[in-house]
Amino acid sequence: MFVDLEDGRCRSCQGQLEICGADDATLDVQCTECGDGYTVEPDAFNDGGIKYWPEAMVEFGEEL
């Protein structure tokens, strides 16, 4: 799942971020341009945690 460029960009190169993992407290992102990866809070993209995190949890979250 890609982060809209209007919502967030790579810290290193300002490139496109892809969400590649999620859990109950974090999202893992990786830049599609420079490859930099890091962990952010669910509301890191100024969406209040209601746009990217729920979708990422469905795709990547662990089943209980």
Image (tube, helix red, strand yellow):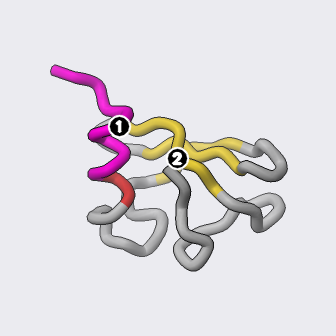
The residue that label 1 is drawn on is 59
Q: Mark 2 falls on what kind of element?
A: strand
Q: Residue at x 47, y 68 (%)?
A: 45
Residue 63 percent coordinates (x, y): 21, 22
Task: Residue at 31%, 70% (x, y): give it.
Answer: 48
Left or right: 4 as drawn, with respect to 33: left
Say which residue appears at 75% left-offset and 62% top-offset.
15
42 in the magenta segment: no
Q: Quadrant of the C terminus?
A: top left
Residue stretch in magenta? 54-64
**Disc assigned to residue 19:** 2
Q: Residues within 10 Å of mark 1 (few under 14, many from 20)?
A: few
Q: Position of residue 34 (x, y in %)?
A: 83, 49
Nearest to N terminus: mark 1 or mark 2: 2
| Rendering coords of residue 27 (x, y %) | 45, 45
Q: Are marks 1 and 2 in contact (CB under 8 Å)?
A: no
Q: Is residue 10 above or below residue 58?
A: below
The extreme bottom residue here reads 6
Total label count?
2
Q: Quadrant of residue 24?
A: top left
Is 31 located above or below residue 11 in the figure? above
Residue lying farthest to the left in this orientation:
64
The answer to which image quadrant residue 25 occupies is top left
- Which residue is found at the position 68% from the left and 42% from the top? 37
Name the residue type under label 2.
Ile
